[in-house]
Amino acid sequence: MASSSDLKAYREQVREWMSEHMPRTDPEHPWDPIHGDDDRALRNRELQQLLHSGGFAGICYPKEYGGQGLSIEYQQIFDDESASYDMPMLFSVPTLSIVGPTILEFGTEEQKKRYIPAYIRGDELWVQFLSEPSGGSDMAGALTRADRDGDVFVVNGSKIWSTYAYRSDFGLALVRTNWDVPKHRGLTMLIIPIHHPGVEVQQIRMVDGTVEFCQEFFDDALVPVANVVGEIDDGWTVATRLLFHERAAVGGASPYTSGQYRHGGEETQNVLRGLVHAAGRSEDPIARRRLGRAEVLRVVQRQLIERVRTGLATGYFPGPAGALPRLFAGMAGVERANLAFEIDAERAVVWNESERGGQHGIAYIRRQASCLGGGSTEMARNIISERILRMPREYAADRDTAFSDVRRSRNV
Ligand SMILES: Cc1cc2nc3c(=O)[nH]c(=O)nc-3n(C[C@H](O)[C@H](O)[C@H](O)COP(=O)(O)OP(=O)(O)OC[C@H]3O[C@@H](n4cnc5c(N)ncnc54)[C@H](O)[C@@H]3O)c2cc1C
């Protein structure tokens, strides 16, 4: 347990270093680390490298793999102090907070030494290859196949919705290695190099013009057996932990997520206050009520995250409790987008390029993404009901059937 004087000294150290080295977020035009044109991935790398040079990368990672070896209290201080700076959140999620802890738990010593220091330094970016064109919620129904041939796997199939895969270096992929057993028992987690023969990445242009999502096509891609994370055919055990880390990261409860993602923190409140003020609605009771509502969301979300984070760390809460902040983050994300859209009124609907209003219109259009990315809120509700509240499990016709015998739509 860190002493309060150590924590105080650390806070001062972070504050001083951040103010000297990191770019401050422009409150008028905040930089969005995730959405937008493709320079974002490069800037994320540069920012992560900067944090590493200052000794603030991988705060909760063990020292032997290039981290700082500090406890979560230090990470929380860092998150508070970094709130008003541009942060490499693309590195934070999924590389450091989802892929990283999964490799820490299941990777071989060789894998840990090879990969962890490289992404803490900001040299290599990872992506998750989980969702497939046939669906993302039923992850265990993966159709991408990996057939063993000596000391390599021959990978064929397709993954989709991988954020910035074209700018990333490796994908952590759930693939099917055994078709003769029920679906959860024939999966393997594989590290797939992205810029590699047999791997083709296509960017998907969304209606808002962004191109961050990708679809990958694997055509006889040869991947060494040494790239298996965990055991062959036991990828579901690894995937279950990966999903745990994913829910913690998306819900804000992961010790490995570095920096607050702007939506939901004090920054969001400042943006909303600025909108109310700019619209001349500071005395308008409806606008004030909406601001109040956003503040309630902020306070409740922060307390929920802290409670679940502490509960998971002490063992008071079971692992699936990570679904609670994940669900809240999705719902709150939608509501915040609604509130900003309503407050910004016509500027969110009609704007020209030089105006700020458009960003709330676009955020409104894509607000549902916060309920899908990182596993949908419906799936989070299933987990809460089945694994926390112990309600009866959802019926699954394919649970005990060999995967090759499971009936599938002709299109997949
Ligand atoms: C911003 C963002 C980033 C993403 N990044 C990645 C990434 O990097 N890598 C990656 O692999 N994927 C990524 N995804 C994909 C994401 O994981 C999937 O969108 C998600 O898992 C849902 O899968 P789907 O879209 O195929 O919907 P489907 O699985 O087809 O589901 C459709 C709808 O049915 C609901 N549903 C499905 N099954 C059930 C059930 N059993 N009970 C109740 N409701 C159910 C779902 O909640 C959803 O609303 C990202 C998505 C977004 C929005």
Image (cartoon, grey):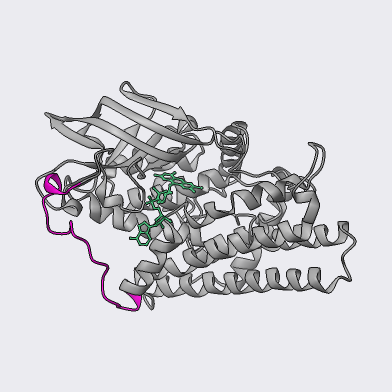
Is 313 situated above or below 177?
below
Question: In the visual, does 229 lie left or right of 272?
Answer: left
Which range is magenta?
Answer: 387-407
- Along the line of sight, the residue nearer the viewer: 329 or 372: 372
Can you see residue 376? Answer: yes
User: What residue is at 47 percent from the left and 72 percent from the top?
Assistant: 308
Is 63 situated above or below 383?
above
Q: Position of residue 199 (x, y in %)?
A: 34, 26
Judged by its main secondary structure, the magenta piece is loop
* Quadrant position of the C terminus in the picture: top left
Can you see residue 27? Answer: no
On whether residue 236 falls in the magenta region, the answer is: no
User: What residue is at 32 percent from the left and 43 percent from the top?
Assistant: 134
Q: Position of residue 394 (x, y in %)?
A: 27, 67
Q: Position of residue 39 (x, y in %)?
A: 61, 31
Quarter assignment of residue 280: bottom right
Q: Position of residue 354 (x, y in %)?
A: 82, 37
User: What residue is at 72 percent from the left and 43 percent from the top?
Assistant: 23
On whether residue 401 falls in the magenta region, the answer is: yes
User: What residue is at 24 percent from the left and 31 percent from the top?
Assistant: 155
- Along the line of sight, the residue nearer the viewer: 52 or 359: 359
